[in-house]
Amino acid sequence: MLLTIRSLTKTFPGTKALDAVDFDLAAGEVHALLGENGAGKSTLIKCLTGAYRRDGGTITLDGAQIDPQSTVEAQEQGIGTVYQEVNLLPNLTVAQNLMFGREPRRWGLIDSRALRAEARETLRPYGLDIDVDRDLGSYSVAIQQIVAIARAVALSGKVLILDEPTASLDAAEVRMVFDVVRGLRERGLGIVFVSHFLDQVFDLTDRVTVLRNGRKIVTERTAELDRVKLIEHMLGRALEHEVAGQAARTAAARPSLLEFRGFGRRGVVEPFDLTVGQGEVVGLAGLLGSGRTESAEMMFGVRPAQSGEASDAQSRLDLSSPRAAIAEGFGFVPEERKTDGIVAELSIRENIILGLQARRGWARPIPRAEQNRIADDYIKRLDIRTSGREKPIGELSGGNQQKAILARWLAMNPRFLILDEPTRGIDVGAHAEILRLIRELTQAGMSILLVSSEIDELVASADRVIVLRDRRHVAELDGPRVTGAEIMRAIAGGEVAA
Amino acid sequence: MTLLKRIAPQLVALALLVALVTVFYPDFLKIGISGDRLVGPMIDVLKRGAPVALLAVGMTLVIATRGIDLSVGTTMAICGAVAAWAVAGGWGLVPALLLALAAGALAGLWNGLLVAVVGIQPFVATLILMTMGRGIAQLITEGRILTFTDAGFAFFGSGSLLGLPVPAWLWLACGLGMAALMRRTALGLLVESIGINRRASALAGVNATVLLIAVYVVSGLCAALAGIVVTADIRGADANNAGLWLELDAILAVVIGGNSLLGGRFSIIASLLGALIIQTIDTGILLAGFPSEYNLVIKAGLVLVILVLQSPRIAAEWRLWRDSHRASREAALQRGAAK
């Protein structure tokens, strides 16, 4: 084995990011590293490249134990990394980028002729015929990516880590980069490939390792791997064992509330049709990067749709901005609570009434007594644990912050509430309370779009589930078909979907 | 009560400073009456502090949105030049004042659009007008000092009302009025909310873009008022020197007022006290009779002391000391009671 990792452990305050993970990489192998958010992929890579110090375990490269203290040291020992965002300098030339930090010198000055010659030599094996004197930024992302790979290989030369290298490339560019990667495999490099695109994983890699919640779940040969099995490993749920907590799905026809027709945005989500019934919970399922969050944000006007339209029984809806969507009776609890949800230094009271106040306009302040009443009411109703309503919301735990953000929207009484990963990163108790709240709200007639990566949550709460794959709505499951098995089959796609 | 607690550090600093100046210049607190107006060093502070105090009102709001407005000094020069030009050209007083205010609002609108719509960092966006503005003012005055003789306009610089100088009334009215507007409506909350987290506020339905532009327009209007005061005071528009470096004093006033440059919670009243502190230092150094070459060094030293005393670290140390002191005193009391 070229690279052997044994019992790698890394702990952050409150979480075990990596729990005794083993990982092997052979020379001449492309090894995929898969997992959902918080699985531990990036922690593993950062421990490997010296960005993090590990707490335990061993890393053996070429038979020798290594303990890189920095990314530079890791490079010198043979481990190079290329990230999704090319981390080179676009306003330097290709040659300068390739040779940065190790420029050939003559009389103490940079020898630019030798620099260019060496740069061309470095690029030769990649079949890339480009002018090394032009600025790197003038080339396409794919070529920049290949230059980044060439630089990493030239610097380190044993292990190459590709962290989502294809996320911003189109199909032809992906092929170009993959040809380069295959070439490197033949030259005997060990390559770690991190990606959310399963098709690419099956296309390129020899073996797959799945991480989940900081543990290694499985390592298998890609050719012998079944897609559905792979999804199961990633999402952590066996098909055999169905959950008891199924939503009591009433197949009865509901009056429809909203209709989306041909709703889409280029490069973000393919146009889709969707009808939302009164008091219905529509689930949105899919892997990370499948377009789940993007669909939700489009419906709320964060990144407005470019095609299609939305309407209710009376008229067409204006969803061109969050303010417009709010005026149409929409609400949105975002996935990223810290950056998109809470206003950390404001009090719980101010966070709860913020949306209501924004809708009333600045000239009509909500009287303080009224604010206190609303805040106290929701603190009690949603059981927000706090010493008082005037505490800055940033000092609450994640689950209580989430409840306060929910309170902000409930105070506005929307007819359609979009919940993007409402239970992410909150404790089990708050988790159950939020699911219970969803049921209560729909009984009162509110319609809900529930975006979730947790299939159990969707099965437990949703009346209907839309499945997304590669930024497209690929399946719509309702009634008895809303089961974990069906959802996972739809997510996995390929031949299994039939 | 909460307001008093918020501005206590500034009040204490101002009181200490006044005491310090009085040591060097015992007549500092003396106020006399000359004709129908009050005279004395403190009255002079209220008058001379007007430009920075006016600028500090708008600057407080801009800084609360996590921005900064470097262009207020040159906006003063532009608006002063516009007013002087209109008055000298016989437009009449009211149109001249309105024209100057419109110029200030336009300058603020330009900054606001660059920051809120184009998305340029406030420091860079307002630096553009800071650089360009003095040139515009010079074009208006055609490179000379544009003088005028309109007594009505001069009233805004050197007149007095109910004993107090008009500039003092102006910044008091503007500052207290703006503070009331912010706290009696929801504007204060919305400004703080976009300053802390613009994205989350916009997702909650706050019209962050319009609010951000409005804040820069207010800053431009405050600069216009300051420009009018300065121009009226010397009865002439000096494009080269009007408001020169005052943006820095305004920022300093906001910071001495305990407002964070990272945006969020703000207090206009505290910024006004900050402006008074700066002017007290300026006037005090002059009256104390130090050679003028010491002025800037002493000013910088005093500002440093005030900011260090206000720093979170010192505040934490002080609380720690106070609590342990209190605890030991209580322990002593209990021992005494036990005996």
Image (cartoon, coloured by chain):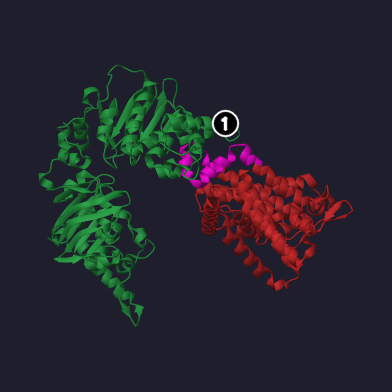
Could you say where residue B162 lies in the image, as x and y percent from the top left?
A: 83, 47
Find the magenta span and give its range: B180-209
Q: Is residue B194 one of those drawn in magenta?
A: yes
Question: How many other residues sit within 10 Å of disc 1, few (<14), some (14-19) or many (≥20)?
Answer: few
**Residue at the image position 68 percent from the left and 53 percent from the top:** B53
> Closer to the camera, B150 or B143?
B150
Chain at numbered mark 1: A
**Residue at the image position 58 percent from the left and 60 percent from the top:** B309
Say whether residue A147 is left or right of residue B38. left
> Closer to the camera, A420 or B322?
B322
Say whether residue A173 is left or right of residue A27. right
Could you say where residue B299 lies in the image, as x and y percent from the top left?
A: 66, 66
Say whether residue A248 is left or right of residue B19. left
Q: Mark 1 points at which residue?
A: A369
Is residue A305 visible in the rendered image? The answer is no
Quarter of the N terminus of chain B within the rendering:
top right
Asked which secondary structure carries label 1, the reply is helix
Is B187 situated above or below A481? below
Q: Colour of chain B?
A: red
Residue A177 falls in image quadrant? bottom left
For the stretch drawn in magenta, the main secondary structure is helix
Residue A248 falls in image quadrant? top left
Q: Chain A is drawn in which colour?
A: green
Q: Which amino acid does label 1 sit on?
A: Ala
Kindly give the residue lying farthest to the left in the view shown: A224
Is residue A324 visible in the rendered image? The answer is yes
